[in-house]
Image (tube, rainbow, N blue to C red):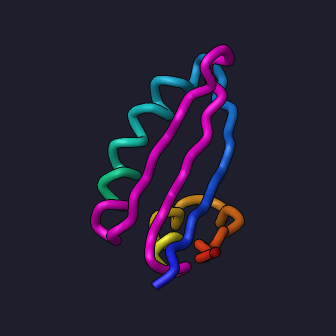
Amino acid sequence: MARVLAMRECVVASADREAYLASLVNRRARAASVPAHFWVFEHATEAGRFVEFTEAASDEAIAAVHEAGPMPALWREVQGG
């Protein structure tokens, strides 16, 4: 079965950074329950600039992880030769 990937970039103000980081605990738990994988990376030189990746087996699983926010664009795994 092909996998589905969603990517979303967000910029968080310095004043909101700690709350954003704290919110990741719940989002990771929600992803694990779906199940899906959820990773967040912060830009190496721009504090507060994040990119979020969610990977799962279906569109529905991705939607379940992102229930609280807008649905990011979806990317489908391809097999090539």
Quarter of the figure with residue 79: bottom right
Relative to 54, 11 lies left or right: right
Residue drawn at (56%, 28%), measured in percent from left and top? 42
Q: Residue at x 41, y 42 (%)?
A: 24
Q: Residue at x 67, y 62 (%)?
A: 72
On-image quarter of the N terminus: bottom left
In this rendered view, identify the residue nearer to me: 78 or 12: 78
Nearer-the-camera pick, 33 or 56: 56
**Location of residue 45 (image quadrant):** top right
Left or right placement of residue 68 versus residue 72 in this view: left
Based on the picture, tell me whether residue 70 belongs to the magenta stretch.
Answer: no
* Residue 56, placed above or below residue 6: below
Q: Is residue 26 above or below residue 1?
A: above
Q: In the displayed image of the protein, which residue is found farthest to the bottom?
A: 1
> Residue 73: x, y in percent?
71, 65
Q: Quadrant of residue 13?
A: top right
Q: Position of residue 71 (x, y in %)?
A: 65, 66
Q: In percent of the image, x 50 and y 58: which residue is there?
A: 54
Compared across the picture, whether 60 is left or right of 7 comes to: left
Number of numbered discs visible in the structure rendering = 0
Question: Is 56 rendered above or below residue 46?
Answer: below
Residue 50: say if magenta: yes
Residue 59 screen position, x and y as percent:
55, 79
With 41 as the anchor, is 43 left or right in this view? right
Give the magenta-colored segment's residue range: 31-59
